[in-house]
Image: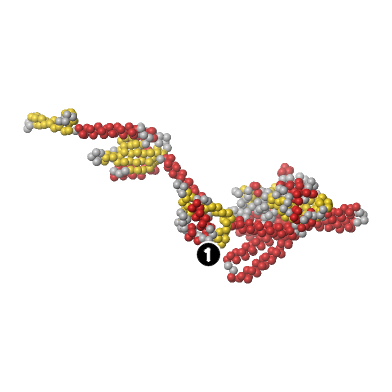
């Protein structure tokens, strides 16, 4: 029993009194033995501990942190309200068992780690997924600190846990974002590099930039200056240092950079940027290098400039009157002497001025609308013996001209201006009119004048043919001189010289092909071709024989159904089928054997009307379908224009004339052609041809 006893100091202290009996030999109590123990401090300590536990429970119940207490065996003996609200279990349920709340994939590892800490009486920290009251797993960060009794013995753990699901999601997103960024950089089709520190140590270099450098793939961790020492005298190092020092980006356009490739300095052109990279404190810690190799573009630009120069020379030296008018104001960009003679104006009064400002006397004669329509629609306009009133050499005169107005296009098919080709037929017209007044007396003279007029008209139609023939002689000389140069160099020719010679041979070969195609195209306008019945099945068989080797090399399959017999020009039908099959064999997808299908169907009256065909004739649709690369639908009209290409000449061979020839052949036969395609299904070309000509 515990009794309060006043001490010498007058304060009551708590004593534990024990009274025990003392027995004699017979088992009878013959005395009592009593002890008193001062337990005041023990009672005060227990009271303090109880008060401390009450304060702990109060604090634990009032916090959002997940608080739990475990005994020396690791068994949970207390959880706060935050745990019950998180799990949806009552305190009693939780204390009976909680390990099933841990994700099955992590349960065993978590328990082994926790019990290991209990055995070692060490601190426990772990991340684990636990089931919440909604049935979803959330990430929990748990930390358990060992607790000890007053006598130093291990009493268990006080654990605190927090929900870190959002942080884990953010970390996952950050990792995914970083991985996506790295993947984007690595797979980027343009060069990207990151250089760290003032010494510009390479921290990141994607495959594109390593390919450009030509120094192999083992560059990360090395100094930029060690990898590319040849840039020392090209201001590249100074540019990088200025960006790192000032924090101001640097951009360069079409900058020539000489790189050492395979032991030889080679010129390249780049559009590149050096962008400073800042840390969280706003200090520059590195530079990011992005670039685009525009070497081919600059070479193409140089070639274009040369081509434009050749075009200018062609206009100035043309045997017919020519002028080029640019833009919506029809600015006179180029004009040759023959055209100046027709206009009766000196060059300085007309060149580099809008046409109707240079020739105000030509206004209000309908020419404004004609030129404007060609510029806006792209449609060619032709006129014969059109009268034009001009003030020539100070005298008002009526000039009769045959002329063609053609759209002048860039490589993308955009109309830049109008090209005018003119023949002055004033003398012939006046002569013919005079002859018409005296028809009876001057029949022979009239016939001669008409003959001269027809020859003048033919000059315009045969201009492309003549120009093509005239181009062959300098082309042959180029090939001959290149061959002589190669023979002269012999074994002393270095790789660069051989490369230049190969490019010359390749260019002359392409030009030869272009001339041949231009000649073939120009011959399509002949009017004396003989029409006869043509079996299209025989045409297909002959074409397949011509392409037998290429078909075998590509593993191609050509299907064709029973095709009709048409009244047509046999040679042009062979050209049509040859170009269409060649086109399908050319534009194939990699690692996919070509499949070409040729079929025919008769057109209904509605279909003829849809395609603006002669309603009095019977038409067949000859369909050429393939599984090649196809093309975008917006290019369906452009591909039939002469010299129009959808791909770089280095990607696919050809001159850009084949489909234009097919279009011309179809039109010659009072038919037409159209196309449709997709990148997944290949191309489909429909050729519409009548069974006979009009009037037969």
Q: Is residue 145 left or right of residue 687?
A: left
Res 59 quadrant in image: top left
Residue visible at 46% across and 54% down in the picture: 197
Q: Is residue 322 above or below residue 46?
A: below
Q: Is residue 617 left or right of residue 28?
A: right
Residue visible at 25% across and 33% down in the picture: 48
Q: Nearer the viewer, residue 564 or 219?
A: 219
Q: Is residue 137 left or right of residue 674?
A: left
Report the quarter where the N terminus lies.
top left
Q: Nearer the viewer, residue 55 or 208?
A: 55
Binning the other alpha carbons within 10 Å of mark 1 as few (below 14), some (14 to 19) or many (20 upward) gives few
Q: Secondary structure at mark 1?
A: loop
Q: Is residue 268 left or right of residue 608?
A: left
Picture coordinates of residue 39, whole percent (x, y): 19, 33
Residue visible at 76% across and 53% down in the picture: 349
Q: Residue furthest right?
A: 441
On the image, numbered disc 1 is attached to which residue? 263
Picture coordinates of residue 489, whole percent (x, y): 61, 70
């Amino acid at each position: 029993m515990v009794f309060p006893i006043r001490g010498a100091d007058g304060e009551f202290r708590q004593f534990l009194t024990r009274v025990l009996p003392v027995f004699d030999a017979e088992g009878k109590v013959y005395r009592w033995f009593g002890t008193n123990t001062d337990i005041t401090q023990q009672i005060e300590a227990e009271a303090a501990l109880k008060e401390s536990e009450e304060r702990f429970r109060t604090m634990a119940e009032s916090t959002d942190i997940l608080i739990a207490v475990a005994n020396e065996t690791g068994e949970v003996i207390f959880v706060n309200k935050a745990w019950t609200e998180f799990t949806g279990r009552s305190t009693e349920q939780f204390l009976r068992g909680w390990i099933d709340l841990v994700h099955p994939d992590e349960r065993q590892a978590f328990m082994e780690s926790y019990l290991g800490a209990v055995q070692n009486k060490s601190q426990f920290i772990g991340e684990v997924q636990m089931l919440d009251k909604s049935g979803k797993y959330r990430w929990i960060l748990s930390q358990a600190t060992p607790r000890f009794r007053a006598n130093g013995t291990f009493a268990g753990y006080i654990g605190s846990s927090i929900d870190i699901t959002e942080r884990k999601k953010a970390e996952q997103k950050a990792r995914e974002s970083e991985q996506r960024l790295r993947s984007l950089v690595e797979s980027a089709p343009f060069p990207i590099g990151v250089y760290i520190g003032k010494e510009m140590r390479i921290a990141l270099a994607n495959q594109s930039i390593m390919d450009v450098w030509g120094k192999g793939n083992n560059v990360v961790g090395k100094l930029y200056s060690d990898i590319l020492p040849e840039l020392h005298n090209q201001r590249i190092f100074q540019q990088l240092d200025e960006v790192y020092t000032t924090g101001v980006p640097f951009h360069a356009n079409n900058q020539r950079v000489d790189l050492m490739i395979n032991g030889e300095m080679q010129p390249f052109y780049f559009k590149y940027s050096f962008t400073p990279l800042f840390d969280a404190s706003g200090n520059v810690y590195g530079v990011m290098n992005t670039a685009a190799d525009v070497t081919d573009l600059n070479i193409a630009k140089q070639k274009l400039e040369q081509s434009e120069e050749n075009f200018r020379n062609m206009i100035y030296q043309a045997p017919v009157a020519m002028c080029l008018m640019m833009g919506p104001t029809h600015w006179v960009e180029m004009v040759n002497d023959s055209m100046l003679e027709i206009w009766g104006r000196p060059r300085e009064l007309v060149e580099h001025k809008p046409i109707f400002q240079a020739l105000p006397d030509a206004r209000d004669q309908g020419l404004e609308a004609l030129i404007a329509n060609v510029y806006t629609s792209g449609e060619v306009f032709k006129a014969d013996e059109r009268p034009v009133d001009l003030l020539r050499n100070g005298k008002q005169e009526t000039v009769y001209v045959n002329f063609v107005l053609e759209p002048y296009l860039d490589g993308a098919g955009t109309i830049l201006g109008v090209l005018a080709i003119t023949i002055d037929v004033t003398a012939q017209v006046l002569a013919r009119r005079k002859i018409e007044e005296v028809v009876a007396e001057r029949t022979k003279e009239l016939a001669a004048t008409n003959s001269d007029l027809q020859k003048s008209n033919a000059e315009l139609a045969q201009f492309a043919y003549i120009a093509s023939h005239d181009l062959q002689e300098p082309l042959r000389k180029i090939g001959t001189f290149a061959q002589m140069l190669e023979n002269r160099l012999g074994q002393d020719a270095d790789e660069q010289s051989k490369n230049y010679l190969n490019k010359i041979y390749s260019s002359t070969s392409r030009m030869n092909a272009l001339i041949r195609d231009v000649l073939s195209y120009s011959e399509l306008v002949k009017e004396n071709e003989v029409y006869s019945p043509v079996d299209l099945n025989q045409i297909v068989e002959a074409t397949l024989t011509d392409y037998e080797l290429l078909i075998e090399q590509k593993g191609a399959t050509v299907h064709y159904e029973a095709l009709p017999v048409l009244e047509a020009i046999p040679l042009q039908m062979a050209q049509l089928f040859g170009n269409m099959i060649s086109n399908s064999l050319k534009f194939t997808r990699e690692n996919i054997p070509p499949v070409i299908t040729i079929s025919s169907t008769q057109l209904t009256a509605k279909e003829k009307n849809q395609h603006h065909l002669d309603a009095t004739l019977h038409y067949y649709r000859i369909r050429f379908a393939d599984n090649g690369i196809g093309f975008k639908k917006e290019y369906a009209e452009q591909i039939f224009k002469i010299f129009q290409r959808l791909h770089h000449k280095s990607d696919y061979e050809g001159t850009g004339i084949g489909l234009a020839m097919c279009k011309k052949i179809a039109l010659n036969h009072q038919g037409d052609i159209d196309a449709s395609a997709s990148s997944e299904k290949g191309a489909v070309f429909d050729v519409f041809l009548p069974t006979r000509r009009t009037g037969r």
